[in-house]
Image (spheres, rainbow, N blue to C red):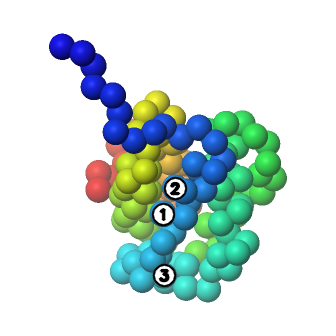
């Protein structure tokens, strides 16, 4: 039996990362769990930052020079359930367009980042415990 070929491409470029970013944030303002956190988002500024950040994570481009945790510190009412929902949306955005090693690595990195942010925000008291499963 021959191996099946992937039906979708893997992430290979910054343009691919931008596809995930655009897909992830599409309709975010209307999301019942996360929309309020993005109600006043400046998408023209946010999209390039997120694309640069994720390109740096995946491809080590060095384009992003920000501090991604800082804006999250200022969000009032952020809870673990928000991170779980964020991860569900993020995985769906990746899976909608891509599959392969880099796509899987992007989802794993998102889980790691979400975990670190929760620890830093004091939302995850037991660091050795598994994060909530969405």
The residue positioned farthest toward the top in the image shown: 1
Q: Residue at x 54, y 56 (%)?
A: 19
Circles 2 and 3, Cβ within 8 Å, touching? The answer is no
In-image side of 57 versus 123 (left or right): right
Please state if 74 lies on the left or on the right of 6 as rendered.
right
Q: Is residue 10 positioned above or below 120 on the image? A: above
Q: Is residue 4 left or right of residue 121?
A: left
Q: Quadrant of residue 117?
A: bottom right
Pointer 1: what residue?
Answer: 24
User: Cα distance, mark 2 to mark 3?
Assistant: 17 Å
- Residue 54 lies, in percent from the top left, at 63, 49
Name the residue: 45% across, 39% down: 9
Q: Is residue 56 above or below residue 42?
A: above
Q: Secondary structure at mark 1?
A: helix
Residue 49 seen in this snapshot: yes
Locate residue 90: give its quadrant.
Answer: bottom left
- Relative image position of residue 42 (x, y in whole percent): 68, 79
Q: Position of residue 6 (x, y in %)?
A: 35, 33
Of circles 2 and 3, the one toward us is 2
Query: Which dot marks residue 20?
Result: 2
Q: Position of residue 25 (x, y in %)?
A: 51, 69
**Circle 3 residue:** 29
């Amino acid at each position: 039996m021959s191996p099946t070929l992937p039906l979708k491409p893997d992430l290979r470029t910054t343009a691919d990362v931008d596809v995930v970013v655009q897909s992830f944030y599409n309709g975010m303002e209307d999301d019942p769990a996360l929309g309020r956190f993005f109600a006043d988002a400046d998408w023209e500024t946010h999209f390039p930052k997120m694309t640069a950040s994720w390109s740096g994570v995946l491809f080590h481009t060095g384009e992003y020079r920000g501090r991604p945790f800082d804006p999250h510190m200022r969000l009032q009412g952020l809870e673990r359930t928000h991170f779980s929902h964020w991860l569900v949306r993020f995985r769906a955005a990746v899976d909608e367009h891509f599959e392969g090693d880099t796509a899987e690595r992007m989802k794993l990195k998102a889980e790691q980042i979400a975990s670190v942010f929760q620890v830093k925000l004091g939302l995850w008291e037991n660091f050795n415990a598994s994060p909530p499963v969405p």
